[in-house]
Image (cartoon, rainbow, N blue to C red):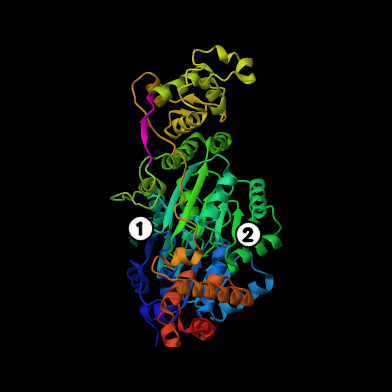
Amino acid sequence: MPMTAKQVLRDVFGFPSFRGIQEEIVNHVVEGGSAFVLMPTGAGKSLCFQIPALVRPGIAIVVSPLQALMDNQVAALRQNGVRAGAFHSGLAAAETMRMRSALEQGELDLLYVSPERLLADWFQEILQALSVSLFAIDEAHCVSQWGHDFRPEFLQLARVLSQHPGVPRIALTATADAPTQADIMERLGLQQARVFRTGFDRPNIRYRIVNKKEPQDQLLRFLREEHQGESGIVYRTTRKSVEETQAFLLKNGIHALAYHAGIGDRIRSKNLDAFLQEDGVVMVATIAFGMGIDKPDVRFVAHLDLPKNVESYYQETGRAGRDGLPSNAWMCYGMKDLMVHLQLIASSEADEPYKQVLRKKLNSLLAICETTGCRRKSLLGYFGQELSEPCGNCDTCLEPVQGWDATVAVQKALSAMVRTGGWFGNKHIVDILLGDATEKVKERGHHELPTFGIGKDLDAKVWSSVIRQIVAQDLALPPGERAWSLLPTPAGMDVLRGQRQVTLRKEPEKSKTSRSTRSKSKSLLGKGMNDSDAELFEALRKLRSNLAKEGGVPAYVIFPDATLLEMARLKPTTEARLLDISGVGPKKAERYGDEFLQVIRG
């Protein structure tokens, strides 16, 4: 007799109850309904199709663009006793043949497949002979040209789905604004499907953005003061900067690894395995890393360079704290980051309307960076979600930012831009405002301009902030292809004419740390814990790490931090009590229970 959804949740995955609207989604799909699901990372999207796949008869096909995500989820499912497999281009020939045989023999309940493999003629022939229980399209924003990670091959999914008209389909994403959501539903034929939206908020993540000064030193201070010995990701934009930052962290005693496309496959795979299987590894990487990395105990994501849009920022920061425990999204950015993005947009081969879309998306991210209000409200507002009150868990809530009437200062800066003809960047403009007769200033005769020295009432740091915010407020932009120079926009000219006032944020004197230096266990367990609990938690982590290395699987696949924390708090000493812990199902209790119980009893 087939199990019910609740039985699968408890007996396979080890969870006592559903979270949020999970149960409503699961029941809808189990009954044969199609769905569009918008849920934030870490909210449990995967269970919304994994459980129906095990309740409904036949094989479920999960389409995903992310090989790492497929492999991670298959490994986790197999640990729970689920007959799961994956088809993608990264498989060795022998594994591909084994998966094909298992598929043809009906030995799988759930198959993850890349869109390229799904579209192959031979795969379609096999699929026609199978009883398909459902189609799940993960990372569904890849379907839409309005999405931030569009994949052209996803456009052909509708053709495959149309060949199985009676099979329910569920599309899932964590990052899609309103136009992208509408595009997804149209392209996947989900216009009549039920829509489930839970919002974008990740309350456990603390958002913090600081002005870039000495980024690697700022990063080191952040890691030492708040995340010593914890796992996290540091994003850089270039291969060279990845390697420089990794070397810097290693030199300063941080266990850091590098990941980018220029590293050989063997080393890159070895570094990825270490990040997944070991505790306390910091991965310094380009933005391609982390797509599909389902590691729940990433305690921080740090950006040392500005992402290209809000969607990228939200998705990348969303790789922190998937287990729901307190985590940090920390970024430092400066004027140079902004100019690099503007240059890339200006020099791209895209048509002008699309360039305008890219600049608009970039400006939306800048508005979040430069807000004087709650940063989370600004971030969620971009996706159309209103937060009724300030969150209390972002830097601008914890350290309120003061605004100031900067109209006159902005007029001075814009005037200097006009008088230099729009051929110079922020550093040259600041030199003119401060009356600094550098060689470049004198060579061009700019020491004789009326604006030379009119900004001595402010220092260089403030002027740099003013110009950065001028660009963020769309008051000045590069003219044409010259992304290194600045000229007032029409809105900026209104300010120059005195037709508009400007309020800017004051830069805080010094950013405080969000918490004092504490051990990982105490920071996660909370105020009610004692030293014995912390010692037990660390002992359980050590056991988990050893088991992961022996089994060649990510540590969190055995048990995530949240499960170990509950063990440390409740200290079960029998298998029956162990099964009461969230995340411990019968299969895992049978496989690992004795060893964890021995540590707890000890």
Going by the numbered disc 2, the residue's amino acid type is His
Image position, residue 281 (x, y; %): 59, 61
- Which residues, given as a range, are shown in magenta? 401-407
Residue 406 part of the magenta-drawn span = yes
Left or right of 114 in this view: 240: right
- Choose top left, top right, bottom left or bottom right for residue 438: top right
Q: Is residue 312 visible?
A: no
Among the two numbered marks 1 and 2 on one chain, the one whose residue lies closer to the N terminus? 1
In this rendered view, identify the residue nearer to me: 566 or 25.
566
Residue type, mark 1 in image: Gln
Which residue sits furthest left? Answer: 388
Residue 259 locus on image (x, y percent): 64, 56
- Residue hosting label 2: 255
User: Which residue: 38% across, 68% down?
Assistant: 528
- Rounded to the nearest angstrom, the CA distance separating label 1 from label 2 is 49 Å
Question: In front here: 92 or 398?
Answer: 398
**Neighbourhood count class around disc 1 (C-alpha, 10 Å): few under 14, some 14–19, many 20 upward:** some
* Helix, strand or loop status at disc 2: loop
Image position, residue 434 (x, y; %): 52, 21
Q: Which residue is mark 1?
A: 191
Is disc 1 placed on a helix, strand or loop? loop
Mark 2 and mark 1 in contact (Cβ < 8 Å)?
Answer: no
- Disc sitting over residue 562 in the figure: none
- In the rendered image, the residue lying farthest to the front is 531
Q: Which quarter of the figure is the N terminus placed in? A: bottom left
The spot of residue 225 in percent (x, y) is 52, 54
Residue 551 in view in this figure: yes
Name the foreground residue: 319 vs 156: 319
- The residue sitting at 32% across, 49% down in the picture is 390
- Magenta stretch: includes residue 396: no
Q: Quadrant of residue 102?
A: bottom right
